[in-house]
Amino acid sequence: MNLLLLEEADFIGPDRVVLGDRRLTHMQEVHRSAVGHSLRVGRIGGLMGTAQVLRLDPREAELQVTLDQPPPAKLPLTLVLALPRPKMLRRVFQTVATMGVPRVVLVNSYRVEKSFWQTPFLEPEAIREQLILGLEQARDSVLPEIVIEKRFKPFVEDRLPAIVEGTLGLVGHPGNHPPCPRALTEPVTLAIGPEGGWIPYEIDLLGKAGLQPVQLGERILRVETAVTALLARLF
């Protein structure tokens, strides 16, 4: 991990934390920390900074922290994502957190299998675990917001237009569409479909909500690859 993220429960004082879980193991086995060493830290949902190791033993570490730096800016983006396969979903959560996506809306789609919605990876603690791994990689301390919308049509017709308002609405979709724009600074609402893509009916509804199809070329990408490629191209 490139950033040691601190939970509220870790604090035993205004500038003191005690760690005794996987973060302690990482300090010992990867950073090979010792008393007096300095580490990059961040308070989840708050500032970032540094911590000095005051005490270190096999069961716990005590750190003195100084939090005086803001986290990196998020992308001006809302990502609407058809629910991927469960194993891919974990990687996607890490990716969006690493790349600075502030808000993800998981939606249903005709090509999303019903069983995907039963995965334990959609439990709040499981989602949070993967987002934290992404934040640790990117050196960020602010968790993305994850919204779950299991009913595609009511969401797209009733709630999506308000999300799209004031943004550039795009939907990634293979076909004879304009190329995805590059290096934007304006806010974007981006929809990415499931394996196999959106069906025509869904593209039509998304278009009525203000999202226009764009493409990345002739190759068909996996969802996790499409997320990375589209975000890198857009921003």
Image (cartoon, helix red, strand yellow):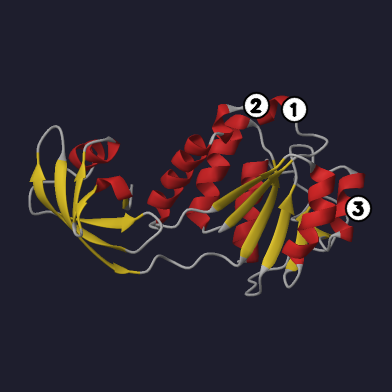
Query: Which of disc 3 and disc 2 is earlier in sequence?
Result: 2
Residue at 33%, 52% in the rendered image: 2
Secondary structure under tag 3 reads helix
Label 3 environment density (alpha carbons within 10 Å; few <14, some 14–19, many ≥20): some
The residue labelled by disc 3 is: 204
The residue labelled by disc 2 is: 118
Disc 2 vs disc 1: Cβ atoms closer than 8 Å?
A: yes
Mark 3: which amino acid?
Answer: Asp
Residue at 44%, 57% in the rendered image: 142
The residue labelled by disc 1 is: 114
- In this rendering, would 10 be left or right of 197? left
Front position in the image: 86 or 31? 86
Quarter occupied by residue 234:
bottom right
Label 2 environment density (alpha carbons within 10 Å; few <14, some 14–19, many ≥20): few
Residue at 52%, 59% in the rendered image: 100
- In the image, residue 178 above or below residue 16: below
Residue 150 spot, x, y in % from top left: 73, 39
Query: Which of disc 1 and disc 3 is earlier in sequence?
Result: 1
| Residue 206 marker | none
Mark 3 → mark 1, Cα distance in angstroms:
22 Å
